Image: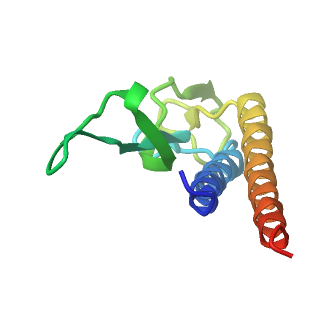
Amino acid sequence: MSLGKVFDIAGSGMSAQSLRLNTTASNMANAQSVSSSVDQTYRARKPVFAPMLESYKTGEPGNPVTSFDPRHSAGEGVQVKGIVESDAPLQRRYEPDHPMANEEGYVFYPNVNVVEEMADMLSASRSFQTNVEVMNSAKQMMQRVLTLGQ
């Protein structure tokens, strides 16, 4: 792996963690939103990540065989596969005086766990910072390589 690829890998990690922070912020912002029906209630969202792998070419010259065995692959970063909604049960509360209450007097709150979202936010923030440090270290190494010829 070339040293230049480090920036692509760390950049993909920073991009993924930024999306993770945005979905967490959206979940936190909607944690206390109220609805009168199950269908209209906000559901917590989580991004799904997957590694991007570069397969090494193996085989005879002129007849390469691509191997997808993880032991013979190098990481190229992280990709976002999508954003999924949580299937945890919604919070149903009996509040007949609430303006959004249905005909039975119930309102529905999202399935957002604020404590879990705060932990996720801290984790995403630290992961983002780690990727920044990786980029800074790679930059310093490249600068030192340039000074070797002097």
Left/right placement of residue 113 relative to residue 130 reads: left
Give how far across and how far down residue 9 sits, in percent: 58, 54
Numbered label tally? 0
Q: Nearer the viewer, residue 64 or 113?
A: 64
Residue displayed at 55% across by 31% down? 106
Left/right placement of residue 102 relative to residue 3 reads: left
Q: Is residue 139 above or below residue 61?
A: below
Q: Nearer the viewer, residue 77 or 50?
A: 77
Give how far across and how far down residue 81 sits, in percent: 40, 46
Residue displayed at 62% across by 48% down? 20
Residue displayed at 54% across by 40% down? 46
Residue displayed at 68% across by 39% down? 97
What colouring method underlies this structural image? rainbow
Residue lying furthest left in this view?
63
Residue 37 visible in this rendered orientation of the protein: no
Residue lying furthest bottom in this view?
150
Residue 35 visible in this rendered orientation of the protein: yes
Locate residue 22: give its quadrant: bottom right
Give how far across and how far down residue 82 sits, in percent: 41, 47
| Quadrant for the C terminus in the image | bottom right
Give how far across and how far down residue 141 sits, in percent: 79, 59
